[in-house]
Amino acid sequence: MPERTQSAQQDEALRRVRSDCPVRTTLRDIATDLRSIDPSGPFTAFDRVFTAHNAANGCQHRETALLKRMPYIDWDTTRGEYGLILDRASWSA
């Protein structure tokens, strides 16, 4: 008899899919780059779109998925601050 806390096969499959999500991984990679390379530099709405375009490597679907998860900014922020915002956003991806 399985333990009450043992997850079902379907639950385990969903967990694996979410942990291997390429959008989540890409968001975390972008966040790491933003925090480590010139973190005090400005980050604008144009930079957001440009970064998603470069990270998608030509895949329109992936670019769209990234832009859906990358929060729009309409205030002055730095690359490091936006990196922290992306880290938080990656958990819901």
Image (spheres, rainbow, N blue to C red):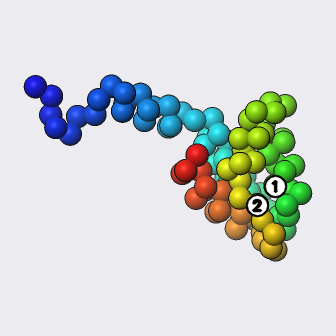
> Which quarter of the figure has residue 83?
bottom right
Q: Tell me which amino acid carries mark 2.
A: Tyr
Circles 2 and 1: CB atoms closer than 8 Å: yes
Give above or below for 4 relative to 39.
above
Q: Which residue is mark 2?
A: 72
Give above or below for 45 relative to 17.
below
* Apparent side of residue 13 relative to residue 6 in the rendered image (left or right): right
**Badge 2 element:** loop
Give above or below for 53 relative to 49.
above
**Badge 1 element:** helix
- Mark linked to residue 4: none
The spot of residue 41 in percent (x, y) is: 83, 67
- Residue 57 visible? The answer is no
Label 1 environment density (alpha carbons within 10 Å; few <14, some 14–19, many ≥20) = some
Q: Which residue is mark 1?
A: 48
Q: Nearer the viewer, mark 2 or mark 1?
A: 2
Tell me which residue sits at (76%, 41%) in the image: 64
